[in-house]
Amino acid sequence: MNYRIEISPLPQWRDARGEGVKKQVEKFFGYPVEKVWSRDVYTVSASLTEPEVRKVASLLYNPVLQGWRSGAAKSENFQPLPECQFLVVVGFKPGVTDNVGRSARSAVGDIVGRKLREDEHVFSSTEYLFYGPKLTRAEAETIGSKLLANELIQSVLVMSGEEAAGGIPLNLPLVSGQGGGQVREYDLEVSDEGLMELSRKGTLALSLDEMKAIQNYFRNAKNRESYGLGRNPTDVELEVLAQTWSEHCKHKIFSARIDYENLETGEKEEIVSCYKTFIQKSTKEIAKEVDWLVSVFKDNAGVIDFNDKLDLVYKVETHNSPSALDPYGGAMTGIVGVNRDPLGTGQGADLLINVWGYCLGSPFTKEADVPEGLLHPRRLRDGVHKGVIDGGNQSGIPYGNGWEYFDPRYIGKPLVYCGTVGTLPKTVHGVPGASKTIEPGDLIVMGGGRIGKDGIHGATFSSEELHKDSPVQAVQIGDPITQKKLGDFIREARDRGLYRFITDNGAGGLSSSVGEMAELCNGCRMDLALAPVKYAGLQPWEILVSEAQERMSFAVPPEKIEEFKALAKERDVEVSVLGEFTDDGKFHMQYNGKTVACLDIEFMHDGLPRMALTAKWKAPKFDEPDLSKRDVAADLTKMMGRLNICSDEYKARQYDHEVKGLSVIKPFVGKCRDVASDATVTMIEPLSKEGVILSAAILPRYSDIDTYHMAASCLDLGVRRVIAVGGKLDKVAGLDNFCWPDPVQSEKTPDGEYKLAQLVRANQALYDYTKKFRVPLISGKDSMKNDSTRGGRKISIPPSLLFSAIAKMDDVTKSVSLDAKQAGDLVYVIGVTKPELGGSEYYAMLDATGNNVPKVDAEQAVRTYHAVSEATGAELVNSLQSPALGGLAVAFAKVAMAGRLGLEIDLAKVPAEGCSDLEVLFSESNSRFVATVAPRHKTAFEAALAGIPFAEVGKVIAEPELILAGRSGKYTVALDALLKEYKGTLDQI
């Protein structure tokens, strides 16, 4: 039987969701909507009695705020909503993860006292009732398709009030899958054009050289007949190789042989793997000088020493392509997916903190400027952040760092960064916590969610530009509740020593996780028919490469499997034994006992032809803007409202950063806790003095001038933000996340050689400056081909490097915030300001780029950071801020706004080299701080900075204004004006 259970708000109370939709309709479309009510609907397709349905309904609603009805039955307080002009019904399409429906299904089973059968379902939908006599059906349909739903994954039904009164169709998105288990063979003895056609049609994302390598392998493969296979590859084998060799998984561009030429100097260099030549090499060399690196570049996340009980685990990922198609599902998958990286590191980490960051087009972009087929940046932003919140907060993990960066070039492909910090016990059941092993005979076990068509071709799809034929099945929606249960189970299984190896099922699904595990022991045998699926009809290759979420793969010793399964049952986690690990050198896949794939492990992982690319560098030249007639006070006020400087507090606070109650320096600080902090400090456990510092830096506009100095500046900014909250340089580790436009020269990318040279130069800078700062890179990720050709217009992102820093803080009671604390305190500027406005936020305000990009003097920076740490360690500083976008002008403003106090500054005293007042204020020179110091600490503070460029430049005043006295005049700006701009731009947006 099918039952409709309707949960409606009581008319006497406000409907916050409905009111929010009304505001969005007004802001997005300006349609004549007078009122919006919303209600939740559950469609229960199960063998229940009428009394059971009433009992279920009575436990699904809030009797204070809501009423329910199901057929003729209803709650005593139920009041029907008045007939509307239009009803818009939004539900999920067949096969799409419905988290609310899934949780409701579990609740129904608990309520009726039995587990629902496989053929019994609960589906959720939301109904919006729109009121306004002038609203048209076409407008209601636009609201449904462009605001309330993503038609890629959701269904939309629009009915008039009169039609709805006659009956609303049941929401029953059943999957009618049948059959499954079929395997196809492909003849590779075709022309080169035929090979590429196969790659394109199959979304394999393989080049001609790669297809020919596969062709040659199968020509010469031996003993296939003994496995029941012919000479031609099966679809399972092709899909496995496409996944394993994808740019997403194999990082082919970072591994390429590159002939690099600097056309300005004549320098030529052959680079074999940017990753090994620059990133890995730097960390290996630093590892000889430090003793706190535990596990780097060989597991799902980087691991560093923290104390005698725990290690720290950190990973940051991107989920760009899926988020471009479905912002909510893509971002949720990003956050729950990166949670699984620490879970699958070593013996399994406990999750401590999440981080997030987005690069987007302006939310104020005109609709006409968004190419057809792309989502509006504001809708992307809303969906992405909601996905991160629902994935992170529902998992019980606070956020410790969050940021947004806006540039029109991200309209084509948003960048969605998600990261997770975890703690790993030093030892687990007698073995090092960061270790993992596999022995032949260990069982292959999958735990967590079931497999569906969601996420198929995710790895290969993410290896291409976004185009009109990008596969919709690559989209997934995570389920944080299922994953939370899985995570709790893993912690118990870990502490009991019930498995030897754990890793997550991310890009490529079982193909990737089991394929990588099999490389360690040199073989595996697995029967895909044993894998639990969401519905019938999946083919073997789909089961193998599906990226359906909330799944982990384990290597379980046979003698531990019964205890492992018993614990899983107790914790309501589904686990399935799929096969065993071997040492026969084969990746051997079966379906119901019949072989469907048999590949040599060596060819899978080492048979990929190395790309050979050319890179040519020549620095671009830009015009310099005329600054002679600028109004400094007006410009500073306007700068505070710019998207990359203003407050994003309204959005950020929707994600709770106080879960667990461990935050010390919070994401927003100051007297009113409303100014973004440079970095955050979090206790490692309740009441601990030891803490974790997190910071991040991204400076894409510097890439327009020179990616070498962009990368150097990112590293410097990330590190100095750690120093600014009281950290020390001697135990800072970094993570590098490269997001690049297509850097491969082709007809579609005629400037590929230049873009590849940009990539080389960024890597060169990371090597040079991580060595000089002695800051090792412990983990990272690259995302290439961040371009879009949708709507017939190519849009490429600016080369973007996110540098994330993590550091230990020995004593969190000595942490420092950026807000001015006391009138009468002295204001200092530490570090030298140079005329470096190239790529700055100030120049961006003037629609200019410039040429003098900020550079980093590493030796001076290191001396400065050690001296500043000495001062904060001695508690000589009341506040500390690290200038970045907007330079000292914005830094002074933030210090004053956060403290709700004024500053009086003499610009002539600022340590500077050949700068005008405007350059002193808005230059973004590196390695600088603004400090406020109590007069009684003046002598000790200045002694701590002996030998470092610094100057006392003013004082904190009680009057709420920023007074800047320069060589060219005196500029006064009221604090209220600065706050209005800073807080107003994205308020309620």
Image: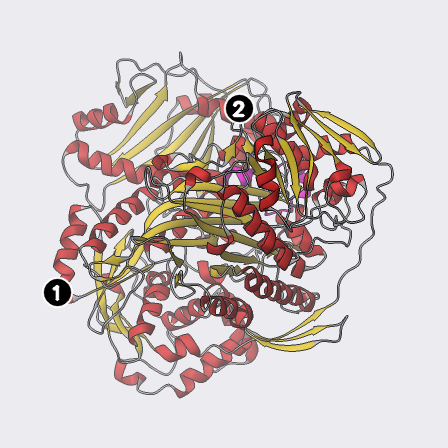
The quarter of the displayed image where residue 798 is located: bottom right
Question: What amino acid type should be assigned to the residue bearing mark 1?
Answer: Glu
Element marked by disc 1: helix
In the image, is residue 608 part of the stretch drawn in magenta?
no
Where does the N terminus fall, quadrant-wise?
A: top left
- State the count of labels: 2
Per the image, is 369 magenta?
A: yes
Nearer the observer, 569 or 651: 651
Q: Which residues are magenta?
A: 363-384
Q: Quadrant of residue 244?
A: bottom left
Which residue in the protein does label 1 denote?
559
> Which residue carries the number 2 mark?
22
In which quarter of the view is residue 578 placed?
A: bottom left
- Residue 253 showing in the rendered view: yes
Q: Is residue 143 visible?
A: no
> Residue 57: percent from the left, percent from the top?
25, 26
